């Protein structure tokens, strides 16, 4: 299958500091990929480079065969949707108005339905007429996730399966809504979208992704299915904790139990 | 809340509410304009207005009618038209600036855009006057001053843009602080010119510093009208981008907005609107803060409606302020900038206290 999103030896340097170094991978339609790694490993920078927000110092990103920045932002928005880590809204927009922003310049009944469905999907049906600034952090994050879902849906209606880039989509969510977001992402992937998410919680990463890319000090330290990437060896090397990983009895999915871990002697 | 019944917020953000609010504002503008026409140093009672306007035959004698018509057509109507247009331009320019900086405190008068215009005008009055007098005592053509003010506003904005833009990105924090610095330099320059000025020049400079709609003529109105019309036509095309910019530059880009282009257009538009206003009326502050803030409370922050209603309410507000300016101490005039600052500065403080978190206090 041809990849929808490729990183070709991508490096990004700013002010003499290297944030990403020689990162290469390709993602195909319907794939779910988790980017994990310690703080400062370059996960968010990599996501920004993939989204076209920043250019690469060396190497190239290819979104459906072209550099993201060659599309122009309006066309680019139809091929990929991005959820940023935190978004503050300084003016009193309602939740509904924020979610509707995802539709770009489309309006009308179809968009209203799309907004209704997205609000229901993130469990914010009763909140649509609240001013977004009055919601809790987790609720605001869900509203922005709904906005991104609307953008993806509008783009896919015009251009076919798209790319969904999520930067810590579950950071301030409770357990149930974390699972809900993972389920939403899976539904998009089942319809052909490629979903790439930066995740901190390794257990959530194994639940969410068929494939995990481990970043460590600006480079890829592991790339493969959870059973091959969330191992005692890699977790020891990258995160500096030993004996944290076990396997679920039936499916053999790795899970990380912080209680079992010791810090690596260094 | 039962299904089907929109909540308060939903109603205020509905299309029905938009139509009602726009209609009410236009009605209010017409009412205020009629009242402003009737009162003044030489009053024209409302019952004599239709005759003076030439709409109906009146019962007044010919001398009264002639006097009414003179006051109305050569003094009052051009002044009302000018006040309304300048109010609209100032409010629209404040709204665009606040959207651009994602900050409800932004105002062209506070960031050196107006001060730049006033400095250029003051320099033209004091220095230009000396050169002209040295060459034989002709008076300066009246178009020179507005042109200088316009060039001054535009230069201030362009310098500001150069300071704040690095590697093709505009930093909001640098823009705000740079604006304060430019305002300080411009005000120092004006102070120096005041020090150099003679009594007559001083009166002219004071006019630019404090603002006034006085001296309105039809020729001024016809110069500013195409400006105002062009700006008003440009505004609706920016509403979509300004809404999304509220979420941040990166998010706006992700949602498909050409962010750098939007910022460039906004900056040129803000300086052109402010420059046009300053060039005819001097520095009038706070209209650009009060108007969009009140409207956001009423109809929400979506720029598609906020921008045109800002123009309406700005026109109403400045028309009311100008009517007070020319009637409070008639036949003398209170500078309108003093009135807007007296009302606007406390308002600014209230907004500041309510939104401390936005400015990091």
Image (cartoon, coloured by chain):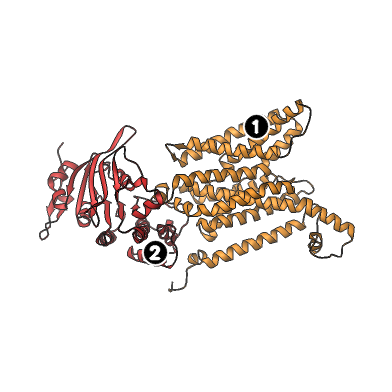
* Image: A209 above or below A13: below
Q: Residue furthest toward the left?
A: A249
Q: Is residue B352 visible?
A: no
Q: Position of residue B330 (x, y in %)?
A: 78, 49
* Image: B227 above or below A106: above
The tag on residue A115 is: 2
Crowding at mark 2 (Cα within 10 Å: few <14, some 14-19, many 20+): many
The tag on residue B168 is: none
Dot 1 and dot 2 within a common chain: no
Q: Which chain's residue wears label 2?
A: A
- Residue matched to label 1: B191
User: In which quadrant is the N terminus of chain B drawn?
Assistant: bottom left
- Mark 1 or mark 2, which is nearer to you? 2
Q: Residue B57 is drawn in which quadrant?
A: bottom right
Q: Position of residue B190 (x, y in %)?
A: 64, 33
Rendered hue of chain A is red
What is the distance, in whole Å, between disc 1 and disc 2 at their CAs? 56 Å
Q: Position of residue B151 (x, y in %)?
A: 61, 37
Please name the residue shown 71% across and 58% down the image: B33
* Image: B180 above or below B10: above
Rendered hue of chain B is orange
Query: Could you tell me if the residues under marks 1 and 2 are in contact, i.e. CB atoms within 8 Å?
Result: no
Crowding at mark 1 (Cα within 10 Å: few <14, some 14-19, many 20+): some
| Picture mark count | 2
Q: Which chain's residue wears label 1?
A: B
Q: Secondary structure at mark 1?
A: helix
Tell me if B18 is positioned left or right of B219 in this view. left
Q: Secondary structure at mark 2?
A: helix
Give the camera-side residue of B285 and A145. Answer: A145
Tell me if B193 is positioned left or right of B353 in this view. right
Tell me if A64 is positioned left or right of B258 in this view. left
Q: Position of residue B324 (x, y in %)?
A: 72, 52
């Amino acid at each position: 299958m041809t990849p929808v999103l490729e990183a070709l030896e991508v490096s990004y340097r700013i002010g003499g500091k290297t944030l990403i170094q020689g990162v290469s991978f390709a993602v195909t339609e319907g794939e779910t990929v988790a980017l994990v790694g310690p703080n400062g490993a370059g996960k968010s920078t990599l996501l920004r480079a993939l989204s076209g927000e920043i250019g690469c110092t060396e190497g190239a990103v290819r979104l459906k065969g072209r550099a993201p920045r060659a599309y122009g932002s309006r066309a680019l928005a139809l091929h990929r949707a991005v959820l940023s880590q935190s978004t503050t809204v300084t003016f009193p927009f309602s939740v509904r108005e924020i979610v509707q922003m995802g539709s770009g310049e489309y309006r009308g009944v179809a968009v209203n339905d799309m907004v209704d469905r997205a609000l229901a999907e993130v469990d914010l049906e009763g909140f649509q007429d609240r001013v977004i600034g009055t919601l809790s952090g987790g609720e605001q994050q869900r509203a922005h996730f709904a906005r991104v879902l609307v953008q993806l849906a509008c783009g896919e209606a015009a251009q076919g399966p798209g790319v969904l880039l999520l930067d810590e989509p579950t950071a301030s969510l409770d357990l149930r809504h974390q699972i809900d977001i993972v389920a939403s992402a899976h539904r998009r992937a089942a319809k052909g979208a490629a979903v790439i998410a930066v995740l901190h919680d390794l257990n959530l990463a194994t639940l969410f992704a068929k494939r995990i890319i481990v970043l460590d000090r600006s480079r890829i330290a592991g790339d493969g299915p959870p059973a091959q990437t969330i191992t005692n060896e890699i977790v020891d090397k990258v995160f500096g904790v030993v004996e944290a990983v076990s396997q679920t009895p039936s499916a053999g999915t790795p899970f990380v139990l912080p209680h079992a871990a010791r810090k690596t002697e260094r | 809340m039962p299904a089907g019944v929109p909540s308060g917020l939903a109603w205020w953000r509905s299309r029905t509410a938009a139509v009602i609010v726009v209609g009410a504002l236009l009605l209010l503008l017409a009412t205020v304009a009629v009242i402003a026409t009737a009162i003044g140093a030489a009053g024209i009672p409302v019952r004599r207005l239709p005759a003076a306007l030439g709409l109906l035959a009146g019962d007044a004698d010919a001398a009264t009618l002639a006097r009414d018509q003179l006051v109305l057509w050569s003094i009052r109507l051009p002044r009302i038209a000018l006040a309304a247009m300048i109010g609209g331009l100032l409010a629209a320019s404040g709204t665009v600036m606040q959207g651009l900086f994602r900050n409800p405190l932004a105002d062209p008068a506070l960031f050196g855009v107006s001060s730049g215009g006033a400095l250029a005008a003051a320099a033209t009055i004091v220095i230009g006057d000396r050169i002209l007098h040295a060459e034989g005592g002709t008076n300066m053509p009246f178009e020179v001053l507005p042109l200088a003010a316009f060039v001054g506003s535009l230069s201030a904005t362009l310098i500001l843009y150069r300071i704040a833009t690095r590697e093709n990105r505009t930093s909001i924090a640098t823009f705000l602080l740079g604006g304060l610095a430019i305002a300080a330099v411009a005000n120092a320059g004006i102070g120096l010119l005041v020090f150099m000025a003679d009594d007559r020049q001083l009166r002219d400079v004071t006019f630019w510093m404090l603002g006034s709609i006085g001296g309105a003529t039809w020729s001024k109105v016809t110069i500013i009208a195409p400006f105002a019309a062009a700006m008003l036509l440009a505004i609706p095309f920016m509403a979509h981008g300004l809404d999304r910019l509220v979420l941040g530059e990166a998010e706006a880009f992700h949602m498909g907005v050409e962010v750098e282009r939007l910022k460039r257009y906004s900056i040129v538009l803000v300086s052109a609107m402010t420059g046009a206003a300053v060039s005819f009326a001097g520095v009038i502050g706070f209209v650009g803060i009060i108007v969009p803030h009140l409207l956001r409370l009423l109809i929400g922050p979506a720029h598609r409606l906020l921008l045109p209603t800002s123009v309406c309410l700005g026109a109403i507000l400045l028309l009311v302020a100008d009517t007070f300016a020319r009637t409070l101490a008639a036949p003398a005039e209170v500078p309108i900038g003093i009135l807007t600052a007296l009302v606007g500065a406390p308002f600014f403080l209230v907004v500041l206290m309510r939104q401390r978190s936005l400015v990091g206090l």
